[in-house]
Image (cartoon, rainbow, N blue to C red):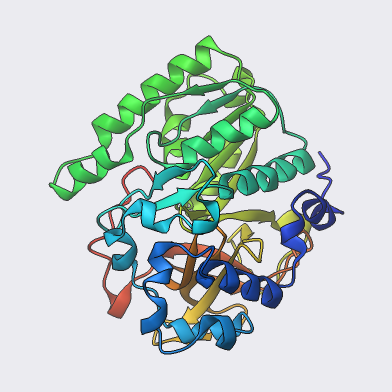
Amino acid sequence: MTTAFGTLTDTLHARVPELAVDLDTWTRRMMRWHFGPETASPFWAARRESLGFDPLKDVDSFAALELFGLFDKAELRAAHARDLLPRGYHDRPFRVFETGGTTGTPCRIVNVTRLAYDVEVYRTVLEARGVAGGDVLAMTPSGPHAYGHFVEGLADSWRGAVHSIDFDPRWVKAALRAGGEADAYTAHLIDQTLTLLAAERCSLLFTTSRLLMELAMRLPRPLHTYGIRAACTGGTSCTAAEAQFLREEHLTGVQWIDTYGNTLVGHALQADAAAGVAPGLPAGAGHSYHLPPPFAVLAVVDPADPWREVAVGERGRVRATTLLEDLFLPNLLERDSAVRTGPHPWFPWDGVAAVRPFQEDGGGAADAVEGVY
């Protein structure tokens, strides 16, 4: 089918006007929000005097965010969730989301408006692909994890039903850290999903790339025969060989829509190579991922110098900055490496491709436990 992406950026800007704001202008707006006495969160207000500069005067562009240095995630882990709530939102309802704890103790963040932005952006992409609407099977982390809440909000936007499974990704991580295996828990997740696939007629499946692979291996018949029109995945990407195997052997008649990202930065959107290759896309990578500014920005940097972006087509470590009213995180070094790509015809901003765990000094990330991601 032909994907209607010709005016995607214009549509996104119309539905989420904040996406049309220039990055430097948005940065100055976020400095006023996160450091203004009436709107700042206790978390950032308490740090203002020790910064050594005035974010309201000295941060006049996105590039000037380097003044903050690298963000230490340990500060976020140690924070009380309520201290992250901006004073400007003191009269608004909010929710607390937690990360999956891949690299240690989970981080907590607050959500006031961010989830609504994510839903509107992703729904626009689904509509452009012709698969928005219908009921949803959510093979996703639940409880305090943002992924499950995002899927519910997405289905709510078109009044679809969400059929969820019980899914605690930390159970698997704890088992792996203790020297155990993930097979039994993964089988438990697949069993729940198979039951729902047989009992209901869902149009969209949301899960992780790794679990999609496990599910495909256990399906008694092709996924499209259950009514699934699109499989939407997040988390760590499959290898190129795994992706090719899934598409050719198990996903005939089903669109596979992948994203790259996490709870802290949001969803980097998949741009298919078939619609035009982003400059620098490695051979065999399949597609690139593009995170819509100004809410968050991904940079691919030299591991030895995190302030130097690598050239398009080169591999480096991912550095992320989140610029939301809900959450401000400057210059966070991610646990991933990626190849930097240029803009794609669908998304006019740089992207990343061939994402894989970052290995420092030739070694693996011993504290990173992905489990079912």
- Relative to 160, 102 lies left or right: left
Residue 163 x, y percent position in the rendering: 51, 21
| Residue at 64% from the left image edge and 82% from the top image edge | 61
Task: Please tell me in which quadrant of the rendered image residue 92 appears.
Answer: top right
358 above or below 219? below
Quarter of the image for the N terminus: give it: top right
Q: Nearer the viewer, residue 342 or 29?
A: 29
| Residue at 26% from the left image edge and 34% from the top image edge | 183
Residue furthest to the front in view is: 38
| Residue at 63% from the left image edge and 54% from the top image edge | 269
Residue 69 x, y percent position in the rendering: 42, 83
Figure disc tally: 0
- Relative to 236, 270 lies left or right: right
Residue furthest to the left in view is: 178
164 above or below 238? above
Residue furthest to the top in view is: 199
Q: Nearer the viewer, residue 56 or 234?
A: 56
Task: Please tell me in which quadrant of the rendered image residue 77 appears.
Answer: bottom left
Task: Please tell me in which quadrant of the rendered image residue 47 appears.
Answer: bottom left
Residue 73 x, y percent position in the rendering: 34, 67
Using the rendered image of the protein, determine whether residue 207 is visible from the camera's viewpoint: no
- Relative to 257, 11 lies left or right: right
| Residue at 59% from the left image edge and 41% from the top image edge | 247
Using the rendered image of the protein, determine whether residue 137 is visible from the camera's viewpoint: yes
319 above or below 257? below
214 above or below 62? above
Q: Nearer the viewer, residue 192 or 261?
A: 261
Residue 166 x, y percent position in the rendering: 36, 26
